[in-house]
Amino acid sequence: MKSILDYETVSLIDEDDALEIIDQTRLPGTIEVIRLHTGEEIWNAIYLLQVRGAPAIGVTAGFGLYILMKHTGAETYDEFMKELSEKSDYLNSSRPTAVNLSWALKRMEEHVKKVAGTELGIGLDDSGFKAITNAEAFNKEVLLTAMRKESELIKAEDIEVCKKIGEYGLELIKDGDGILTHCNAGQLATCKYGTATAPMYLAHEKGYKIKVYCDETRPLLQGARLTAFELHSAGIDTTLLCDNMSASLMKSGAINAIFVGCDRVAANGDAANKIGTSVVATVAKRYGIPFYVCAPTSTIDINTKTGDDINIEQRKPEEVTEMWYKERMAPEGVNVYNPAFDVTDNELITGIVTEHGVLHAPYTESIAKLFS
Ligand code: MRU
C-alpha cells in the first residue's frame, strides 16, 4: 500500500500549468493531492500551511513564479521583469519568517537576468547591468524555459542537500539513541528525507534501533499530524508527547540528542524555528543534551545580523482558542499570543548541521567562513 512517504511534497505539472502539493492541513486523516494554478491559490496554500516547512515553501515559490509567468503578455524585457518582480513580491508576502521563500524567488529572478544576458544579450553592457528594451532580442520562450529548469533544479538540490544533512547528522547518532524533535522538519517540509529527520531516516536504514520522540507542537500540531505520521509510516519507533512533557522526558534520561529544523539562521547563529523550539533548547542545556539545528545553507541568512532582526510571523488567535476543538476553549474576548516561531539563542545550539558539514560556535566565524 502507498505510504505518505511515496507522495511528492511539491511537484510541477507543466502540462496543466499547475503545481501539485499534498494538502498538509488534512493529514494524517486524509491524503489529498491538490493542484494550484493561480497566484491566489499558491499564496493561500503557503499562508494556510497546506504546503509548509522552509525548504518546501522555497520549492513551491520557484515553481509558482514560473507557473504565474508562463502566460505573460510581456512584449519587452522590461515588461517581463516588471511583471516577474510584482508576482515575486506577491508570493513573498505570504509568510515572512522562512528565508527560503525570498531566497528561491530571488534566485529565480537572478537566473532570468543571467540568461537574458548570456543567451539574448539583453541587460549587459560595458558599464555593468543595464536593461535594454530591445523587442527583437527579447524572447520569452528562452526566459521561461530557463525559469522551468531553475525551479526543477531548486527541487533537485533540496533532495541532495537533505541527504547530505542526513549523512552529517548520522555521525551524531549512536545505535539505541533516543532522539527528540519539534515541529515537522521532515520529508513533508522538504522534497525528500527532511532536514532534522534525515539523520533519523538514514540511521533507520542502517539498522540502528533509534527511538524518536515527537513534540506535538501546539497550536498547529505539525509534530503529531506530520512528523509522527511520516516517521511511524517509515517503521521508525515513534512516540508522541505534548510539548509540556519534554522537560520531564529529558530529565528521565531518555533523550540522547535533539534535532530540529529551522526557518532562518542569522549571521550569528541565532535560529528561528517553530514556536517552542527555544524552550526545548533551554531545557536541553539544563540537562546537558546536545541540541542540533539542521539547516540547508539556503536557510542561513547572512544579511540578518542576529535573531532580533528576524521578522516573526504572528498568526490568528483562533488557532489557539478554537482549532481542533469541538467548541471554543477560551473565554470570548481574551487576548491571545500566537507567534508562529521563536528564536533559539546561538549559545544553546551545539551544532548547525548543513549540507557542507556541522558548524560550531563561534557561529559568526563558522558561518562567515562557510559563505566565503
Ligand atoms: O509553520 P511551519 O509548519 O511552516 O513551521 C515549520 C518549521 O518550523 C520547520 O521546523 C522549519 O520550516 C524547517 S523545515 C525543514
Image: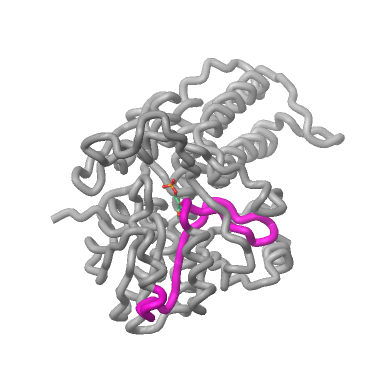
As displayed, is residue 332 above or below residue 203? Answer: above
Please state the extent of the stretch shown in magenta in the rendering. Answer: 250-276
As displayed, is residue 20 above or below residue 285? Answer: above
Query: What's the residue at 58%, 29% (across, down)?
Result: 89
State the image quarter where residue 200 is shown. bottom left
Query: What's the residue at 19%, 43% (across, down)?
Result: 30
* Residue 14 visible (yes or no): no
Residue 344 spot, x, y in % from top left = 57, 59
Question: Quadrant where the N terminus lies?
Answer: bottom left
Query: What's the residue at 48%, 58% (across, down)?
Result: 277
State the image quarter where residue 193 is shown. bottom left
Residue 90 spot, x, y in % from top left = 54, 27
* Residue 260 visible (yes or no): yes
Q: Is 226 contained in the magenta span?
A: no
- The residue at the far right in this view is 127
Of 128 and 310, the residue lying toward us: 310
Total numbered badges shown on the rendered structure? 0
